[in-house]
Image (cartoon, grey):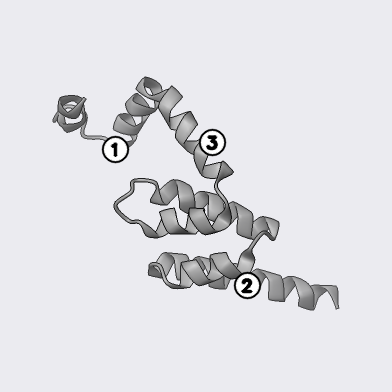
Amino acid sequence: MVSLYRNKWLNSKSLKESIFNIMFKDQIGKREERIKKLETAALISEFQDKHGGNVALCRKELQERYKAGVDQELIAEAFKQSGQKDQQWVESQKKKVTDERQENK
């Protein structure tokens, strides 16, 4: 598998991702299910583990939960401690809520 990933003929990132998604569809699905079932605190812990390999999946799930109104304060705090893009995302979500409240007045 490593040789396939490092193959010089497969230099397109999207092509590599597509191949791996096809080859490991079962395992990818199980990982996503496990992430969705985690409680928010455990999900944040896994999100903060930058070497765990699940940061992107955890980020996506945390963003979905935030938008759904679940544990927004915990998620916002975790994103504020993360990278600049995560911080900007939280600020944009807060701005959307503020703008919606002003429109409804």
Seen from the viewer's position, the closer of residues 74 and 104 is 74
Disc 1/disc 3 C-alpha distance (Å): 24 Å
Q: Which residue is mark 1?
A: 13
- N-terminal of the pair, mark 2 or mark 1, is 1
- In this rendering, which labeled residue sits more in front, label 2 or label 1? 2
Q: Measure how far apart labels 2 and 1 are at the Cα level.
A: 33 Å
Q: Tell me the residue at 29%/31% (across/down).
A: 16
* Residue count near mark 1 (Cα–Cα under 10 Å), binned few <14, some 14–19, many ≥20: few
| Label 2 close to label 1 by CB (< 8 Å) | no
Residue corresponding to mark 3: 33
Percent position of residue 17, x then y:
34, 33
Quadrant, the N terminus: top left
Q: Which residue is mark 2?
A: 94
Q: Identify the amino acid type marked 1.
A: Lys
Residue at the (40%, 51%) spot, across then down: 55
Is residue 1 or residue 94 the one in the foreground? Answer: 1
**Residue contact at pointers 2 and 3, CB within 8 angstroms:** no
Helix, strand or loop at disc 2?
A: helix
Neighbours of disc 3 within 10 Å: few (<14), some (14-19), many (20+): few
In what element is the residue under mark 1?
Answer: helix
**Looking at the rendered structure, which numbered label has been put on residue 91?**
none
Where's residue 98, x and y in %? 70, 76
Q: Mark 2 against mark 3, which lies toward the viewer?
A: 3
Q: Position of residue 103 (x, y in %)?
A: 80, 74
Counting from the top left corner in percent of width and height, residue 90 is at 54, 68
